[in-house]
Image (cartoon, grey):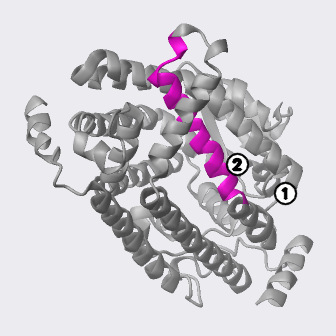
Amino acid sequence: MISIIDSLSIFDNPNINWKLVIVGFTIGQYLFESYLDYRQYKVLNNKSPPPSIKAEVNQETFDKSQKYSRSKAKFSFFNSTFDLFQNLAVIKYDLLPKLWNWSGVAMSSVSWILPKFMGGVITQSIIFIFSSQILSTIVSLPISYYSHFVLEEKYGFNKQTIGLWLTDKVKGLGLSIVLGSPVIAGVLKIIDYYGDSFIFYLMGFILVINLIAMTIIPTLIMPLFNKFTPLEEGELKTAIENLASKQKFPLTKLQVIDGSKRSSHSNAYFTGLPWSKQIVLFDTLIEHNSTDETVAVLAHEIGHWRLNHIPRMLIMGQLHLFIIFTLFSAFVHNKSLYNSFGFYNQQPILIGFTLFGDILKPLECILNFTQNLMSRKHEYDADKYAFDCGYAEELARSLIKLSNENLSSMNADWLYSAYHHSHPILPERLSALGYVSKEKISKDEPKKEDVVVEEKLEKQE
């Protein structure tokens, strides 16, 4: 590790224009991802479903899915372009040192009410990061509004009110400040205290934080945003409990979340520590699926647990952190990097990590691809687990229904999918399950609300 740090010390060179380097990486990533978006957009202009699901999806549903995906693609391109110009403006106008200096002034103005131990760089870093987050949230409000109340509304998915949307924003910022401040302080203190030996201590700290988050998020945080109610007694609850018992899944709670309060998209998941698990079903999933199809989805989720996918992803995450922290340890004292961005008298660790994140973008692209590759393999394995439990056809039918109800993309460019998708698309999953069509699963007669949405789309075309 020392040799890596020593070899990378050559980059602490005043002749290196780090601003130009980071601008190049930022624009390079934007161009690469825009190229992938272009490839995907061409696929989204296909006029008929892939052959493997042509018998399962009626033309009306497919056309609506393609329109929805094209709309999201256009919005994504605009959003990424907006982010690019925003990042370039931050660099060109030296907004980082200006906001950092303002954070110092803000800290000094309230120093009289702060304990003595809170008057240093760590407190200034906390003020800086949350000031940045608040500004970013304000700047992105129009884009967020468009996403929810124009794009999602247009296709019949948005169920939020403006009041609920704004309340979520305020709650999110508040929780970030309350829960994020001690975490940020801990990270900065570990790096400051242990010097160049911080890597393993920081990895351990973040692992503990992740484990704590797995405990408190489902029980304390998520109920602030959604209502959780126990699943009612009946056929579905009995079937799920029987499946959990048969698979020795440590089920302690079985709850329904009011996901329909915000969106008509469907989902299911489980949370908790290894010895205590909570299954959460979206009310929209229960509404659209039969009992057997819902149980099949949970057999897939239990497959993730049985096949140790969560510990594997934690290990993968730790390896990811090791690579990042090892490289960062070579940049944390890089004076030329700080000087290029206007930090001449101070080298704040938080600023160094922020700038290092921009330098790391090419490597992050590769790591992102690797993580998605593992995630897709886990999805195939969990599908296979549900297949072995005897739910092959029910899972396939549920996947088709979820795809139809969510208007998920039904085909994808291979390179775009490899880079962006953590889950295989529907035709790939059905093929892996060996599903053979027996009847059309999407309804030929659309629901009343779908007719209204279609009429809106036709008027806007």
Residue 249 visible in the picture:
no
Which of the two residues, 361 or 256, is positioned nearer the viewer here? 361
Residue depicted at 73% across the width and 57% down the height: 265
On screen, residue 42 above or below 131: below
What residue would you read off at disc 1? 159
Residue lying furthest top in this view? 116
Residue 186 visible in the picture:
yes
Quadrant hosting residue 336: top left
Residue depicted at 54% across the width and 15% down the height: 118
Q: How far apart are marks 1 and 2 (CA)?
A: 23 Å
Span colored in magenta: 117-141
Q: In which quarter of the image is the C terminus?
A: bottom right
Which element is circle 1 on?
loop
Q: Position of residue 153 (x, y in %)?
A: 81, 68
Quadrant hosting residue 208: top left
In reply to whether residue 196 is colored magenta, the answer given is no
Residue depicted at 81% across the width and 48% down the height: 166
On screen, residue 378 above or below 424: above
What residue would you read off at disc 2? 294
Q: In this figure, what is the number of numbered marks?
A: 2
Three-letter amino acid code at the position of disc 2:
Thr
Residue depicted at 41% across the width and 69% down the height: 30
Q: Is residue 8 shown left or right of residue 144?
A: left
| Neighbour tally class for label 1: few under 14, some 14-19, many 20 plus, Cα within 10 Å | some
Three-letter amino acid code at the position of disc 1:
Lys
Which of the two residues, 354 or 210, is positioned nearer the viewer here? 354
* Front of the two marks 1 and 2: 1
Mark number displayed over residue 340: none
Quadrant hosting residue 67: bottom right
Which element is circle 2 on?
helix
